[in-house]
Amino acid sequence: MNILITGGAGFIGSHLCKKLIKNNNIICLDNLCDFYSPKIKENNISSLLEKDNFTFYKADIRNRDDLHKIFEDNNIDFIIHLAAMAGVRPSIEQPELYYDVNVKGTLNIMECCKKYSVDKVVFASSSSVYGNNKKTPFSESDNVDFPISPYAATKKSCELMIYNYHSLYNISAACLRFFTVYGPRQRPDLAIHKFTNLISQKKSVPLYGDGTTRRDYTYIDDILDGISKAVDFIQNNYTYEIFNLGESNTVSLIEMLTIIEEELGIKAVKSWLPMQAGDVEKTYADITRSREILGYYPTTDFRNGIKKFITWYKEMR
Ligand SMILES: NC(=O)c1ccc[n+]([C@@H]2O[C@H](COP(=O)([O-])OP(=O)(O)OC[C@H]3O[C@@H](n4cnc5c(N)ncnc54)[C@H](O)[C@@H]3O)[C@@H](O)[C@H]2O)c1
């Protein structure tokens, strides 16, 4: 199968390229934006560039001409659309950029699906669409009409847009709501990586709130397993589905910090700050549907995942 992976040089995308290249031709599109160092992204895909069944395009999903060229030059069977401006807090500072890349960029991708008859799509949505949902765990049937950040609103908008293309143009699609993904190559802006950096350098760690906010952290290998199961499912079923991909287990901010301290063998210098706008109290995935329909069973618990992350972090440094 010829699979287009947008955002393929990023954290999740580069791991996914490496996994799926075993049985597919991978067309990787990424603009290597400077949300964090483009050098990291170049490194992420450097070992793939020499492979015959890997093609890389440095291109922007906002640029329709570039997209048309990529679709014309490649007989694309399947799209895994991960390219986005990620991150909740920066989306509050730059809402226009987030809407431009995430919503308009996705619209450009869906228009290409229509024009070039690509009828299978998997999209990276986010647990942030649940906002401050009081009912836990969060299930796909919960009301997600109350996003509390531009980032969350863009992800929900894309889910709606993709449904619309499904209903108008018979595109089969799965929107996967990822719950905080971590592991080797994790984005440096995300808390686990950021805290590990700061603790290692003996710098103070900013902790927002009182330490009781909770997150459902998902190890990268489990996310990759969920994505490939969703790809198989969409290959074999004409449908539109939303699936949670989480660990279905929550860890508080202070527990997360303590586990990183223990695994690094260094105590953090803590700096307590007020909760930030856009941050939710808790994320917690109900993965019953993903289990039943996709056969998604995450296997890496938080302590083990952090051990693997820290091993990678030390090697990388
Ligand atoms: N990491 C998480 O915890 C998490 C949680 C929920 C959802 N997601 C979603 O999963 C996807 C991948 O996230 P990630 O953590 O790997 O982030 P990432 O930033 O590492 O990857 C995104 C990639 O998209 C590329 N990109 C950004 N704008 C682009 C544009 N205009 N044109 C082409 N490429 C562009 C970036 O250069 C980057 O390589 C994103 O859609 C993100 O919103 C991630």
Image (tube, grey):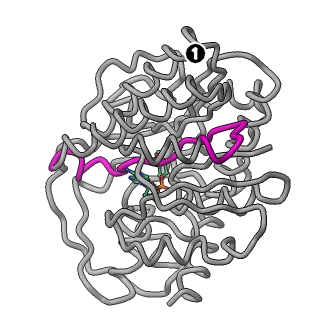
Magenta span contains residue 283? no
Q: Examine the image and state in which quarter residue 78 appears.
A: top right
- Assess disc 1: are there few (<14), some (14-19) or many (≥20) residues with their C-alpha within 10 Å of its C-alpha: many
Q: State the residue lying farthest toward the top.
A: 168
Residue at 63 percent of width and 20 percent of height: 171
For disc 1, the marked residue is: 166
In the rendered structure, which segment of residues is drawn in magenta? 72-93
Q: Give the answer, above or below, for where 254 lies relative to 203.
A: above
User: How far across and down, in percent of the image, does residue 252 sit?
Assistant: 41, 53
93 and 25: which one is in front? Answer: 25
Q: Give the answer, above or below, for where 221 lies relative to 175.
A: below
Residue at 74 percent of width and 45 percent of height: 2
The kind of secondary structure element at disc 1 is helix
User: How far across and down, in percent of the image, does residue 158 sit?
Assistant: 42, 28
| 250 relative position to 194: left or right | right
| 133 relative position to 256: left or right | left
Q: Examine the image and state in which quarter residue 247 appears.
A: top right
